Image (cartoon, rainbow, N blue to C red):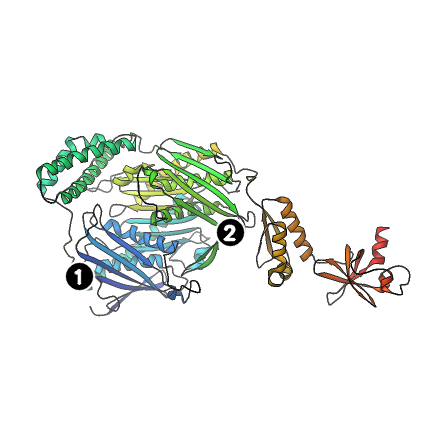
Amino acid sequence: MAQKKWSLQIGGRVLEIETGLLAKQANGSVTVRYGDTVVLAAATMSKGASRISGYFPLMVDFEERYYAAGKIKGSRFIKREGRPSDDAVLTGRVVDRTIRPLFNARMRNEVQVIVTVLSIDGENDPDTISVIAASAALAISNIPWNGPVAAVRVAQAENGEFILNPVNGELADSKLDLVISGTKDKINMLEAGAKEVPEETIVEAFAFGQEAITKIATFIEEIVAEIGKEKAVPTLLQGTPEFEAKVKEILLAEGLESALYDPSKVVIEEKTKAINEKVGEYITANFTEGIDKLKEIAQQVFEEVSDEIVHKNILEKEQRPDGRKLDQIRHIDCQVGILPRTHGTGLFTRGETQALTVTTLGSPGDEQIIDTMEVDMKKRYIHHYNFPPYSVGEVRPMRGPGRREIGHGALAEKALIPVLPAKEVFPYTILLVSEVLESNGSSSMASTCGSTLSLMDAGVPIVRPVSGIAMGIIVDQANDSKFKVLTDIQGLEDHYGDMDFKAAGTTVGITALQMDVKVQGVTLEMLKAVLIQSKGNRMEIMEKITTAIPTPRAEMSQYAPRIVIMHINPDKIRNVIGSGGKIINAIIDETGVQIDIEDDGSIFITSPDAIAAKKAQEWIDNLTHEVKAGELFQAKVTKIMTFGAFAEILPGQEGLIHISELAEARVEKVEDIVSVGDIVPVKVKEIDAQGRINLSMKAAAKKVE
């Protein structure tokens, strides 16, 4: 393919797509440039069916490269870039969640999309550019895919105006950070953090973003019309029409519809397992070859028939699998303070989903250092999400956090950030860990609610409580103006539904959003309906939370460390640290406290022992005290001279007691009055222009009298 380049003006900058230069052996490849941020996307498809069974084998990888930012990172011994950062994982998820719904679910060719950041300018974030690059690479390739899609970022200025694809400076001051993806006329992925933004404003932001998405998707269509390859015929998981019809007949005859309708997840699993065994018996009894393949096809038919049943019953009868009304939340139970030695705990149970969130408070020095291709920063609020296999009754190896755990943890973290107290008010590093103990729908929002409970139990003075809810939608594929919104979707409704929409916020507004779809996309009308219904549901959950604990506790746990905040003249920092850290290490060794010093002169003394903290504070006070004329001290004589004596009034601060200031009467020899090591009362007489301290024992004696 010849090298070609196209450009589009969007958000006040040029979006440039180029192909035919790099990665030409991939089925489709492009580089996309926006500002000086450049990403390469390469899409490749296997020629035959994958050995992976049970789902469409799509792999999406987002590759950070430190050279893109002109950085050399790593230890002294290892410079090769290793496991992806959390930010890279989250960006990969954004790309995956945008492109996946546009593939045929029966396709079994392996498809891999690799997005590599080649250059980054520090202003234009590569996440939305990566979606556009992946979309363009797939669209021009021969890989069967129902795109294109596009993505943009939307921020909101202080005056309320929306900003398209803000640069980093604009984003820092924004009340909204929304990444939105979709096709020309529908939205299929959302990711947002917000500072308590009202639902009405969020809907306006959706419409603003959709307009730009339409423009970019149309631009990619024009490129496809010029150079796009003819789409290949995919390898599909399908049997003969007769076989699939027979499987469907068995499923319905064995009572699949009634099996899907029960309040208990365990009961549904038991009933559907028995039905699938009947299908397996039919296959074994009637076929001798390709048994495993036929069972996989039968499982696909099972999924599609189940999907049809759930859609039909909800659209026509408003009948949900567990019998709830469309806007009804499952039973909720909130508890706090259930663990004796942790700093704060919150247990949130909603139906068969349960999350235990534990708060740990640490010193400012416990902040996490974030060192990535894009940023070098410190993070004082951290949220970890764990999803053990027993939460869904499964047995599998535990191999550390995967994309799901990182993504759900980031969402819960994002939901709470806007209500956290400022560091100046509450200087603690805050670590929240959510343990999902049971799961049947929206464990991420259970973690968000559990986090609110846990923070308040720990005495963290959050601005307002945050609650979250997972919403779903069922759409009539023949007429997408006909749809039903579902509140608090459980696992089965998430699996067979058309959307998973998570909304978190306070009584004032939204703090976090996340949406995925299993259809081509959803309309603005649908999103508006979901947001309106979710607001009432969130307030209902909020009432349960505030009933369990109305406000943050006035006192922290006795096991939580206490932090003493001091502010000193930055020029005095060296007095506290000492040569080679000698002084600060002596304070720490003797008192057992932890000391963190910032460049502006802020000092944080952390210790569970109030007496030790006070001792360290007094020590630092003495080291940094700025002496003033008229102050009285008990000074230690350190040196005798013919003209007077030097005495230490504070650690590291000495003054001169002139021979004439030793006593009222005339003094012939300094040694007649004082000796080295004596502790004597002195008064600061003056501090001269050179900063030298002049002391007087004579004046101190008069003061005592």
Task: Tell me if residue 387 comes above or below residue 651 in the rendering.
Answer: above
Residue 356 placement (x, y as % from top left): 42, 38
Q: In the picture provided, is 303 more to the left or to the right than 326?
A: left
Dot 1 or dot 2: first in sequence order is 1
Q: In the picture provided, is 179 more to the left or to the right than 312?
A: right
Q: Which mark is residue 229?
A: 1
Task: Residue 182: tell me if it is visible.
Answer: no
Q: Residue at x 46, y 47 (%)?
A: 417
Q: Residue at x 89, y 63 (%)?
A: 667
Q: Quadrant of the N terminus?
A: bottom left
Name the secondary structure under disc 2. Answer: helix
Q: Residue at x 41, y 67 (%)?
A: 70
Q: Which mark is residue 366?
A: 2
* Total tally of numbered discs in the picture: 2
* Residue neighbourhood size for the residue with mark 1, other residues' Cα within 10 Å, grouped as few (<14), some (14–19), many (≥20): some
Task: Tell me if residue 209 comes above or below residue 545 in the rendering.
Answer: below
Amino acid type at image mark 1: Lys
Between the residue at mark 1 and the residue at mark 2, the CA separation in whole angstroms equals 53 Å
Name the secondary structure under disc 1. Answer: loop
Quadrant of res 448 = top left
Q: Which mark is residue 397?
A: none
Residue 302 placement (x, y as % from top left): 18, 38
Residue 626 placement (x, y as % from top left): 70, 58
The front one of 76 and 254 is: 76
Residue 139 placement (x, y as % from top left): 22, 58
Task: Tell me if residue 196 comes above or below residue 658 in the rendering.
Answer: above
The front one of 416 and 438 is: 438
Extreme-right residue of the structure: 665
Quadrant of res 212 = bottom left
